[in-house]
Image: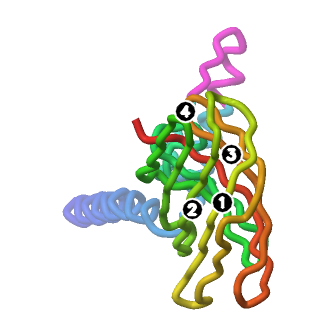
Amino acid sequence: MNRHHASRSRMAAVLLAGVAVLPLAACQAGAHTVRTTAAAATTQASTSSSSQVTTTATSVTAPVTAPVTAPPATVPAGRGTGGPGSLTVSITSPVAVAGHVDTTVTCEAGRRYAETANGVIRGYTVAETVRVAAYHGPGSYPALVTVSVSSSAEGAYAVDAIATTAAITSTGGSLSFSGQTSAGRTLAGSISWSCSA
């Protein structure tokens, strides 16, 4: 009797040890028993009730990242042609300088028209003056223009009192020019200005 009782006690201890080891085995890497049992239970549940199908959606959370923005387009400084107190320049020779700058543009209109402006555009200092004789309001006029373009790397190019035609408006004007510098280089391009308010 004691031997039978001892045998049962040993068997119960072995069973308890086995039950305790089973969950630990399921936690180990590569434990196929748990996966197979879960898959079988899922298959059995879906086949036993064909009229009631339950779908569990798995939510995937994507990492939040800052939006990618394109680099800003290269635009001239300032407000653009037509803004009060602005100068737009396109020099084509002997250097290529194009851009816009907000600056003081002095315009005097009477029997004569006079405009003066300067500014730094793309690293070049540009200064210009326009003179119109016999001015009588907006229109197209023969004009004399003086332009200088300089940089610390390339030196200065200047033309003085080059004859051209200027289109003068009530708020500014524009012209194209081409002339020889004192060193025999051709300084050419176009300028437009808007008088400061």
Q: Which residue is mark 4?
A: 171
The three-letter code of the residue at mark 4 reads Thr
Q: Secondary structure at mark 4?
A: loop
Q: Nearer the viewer, mark 1 or mark 2?
A: 1
User: Range of the magenta residues?
Assistant: 44-56
- Image coordinates of residue 141 in percent, x first then y, are 73, 41
Closer to the chain start, of discs 3 and 2, is 2
Residue at 57% of width from left, 79% of height from top? 150
Q: Is residue 144 above or below residue 171?
A: below
Where on the picture, by quarter, is residue 162?
bottom right
- Which residue appears farthest toward the top when viewing the image? 51
Whether residue 132 sits left or right of residue 28 in the image: it is right
Query: Where's the N terminus, which quadrant?
Result: bottom left
Residues at marks 4 and 1 touching, judged by CB atoms closer than 8 Å: no
Q: Between marks 3 and 1, how big is the CA–CA gap?
A: 11 Å
- Image coordinates of residue 105 in percent, x first then y, are 46, 49
Q: Between marks 1 and 2, how big is the CA–CA gap?
A: 7 Å
Q: Nearer the viewer, residue 191 or 7?
A: 191
Where on the picture, by quarter, is residue 27?
bottom left
Q: Nearer the viewer, residue 102 or 195?
A: 195
- Image coordinates of residue 96 in percent, x first then y, are 73, 72
Q: Secondary structure at mark 3?
A: strand
Residues at marks 1 and 2 touching, judged by CB atoms closer than 8 Å: yes
Q: Which residue is mark 3?
A: 174
The three-letter code of the residue at mark 1 reads Val
Q: Nearer the viewer, mark 4 or mark 1?
A: 1
Q: Which residue is mark 2?
A: 128
**Residue 64 in view, yes or no:** no
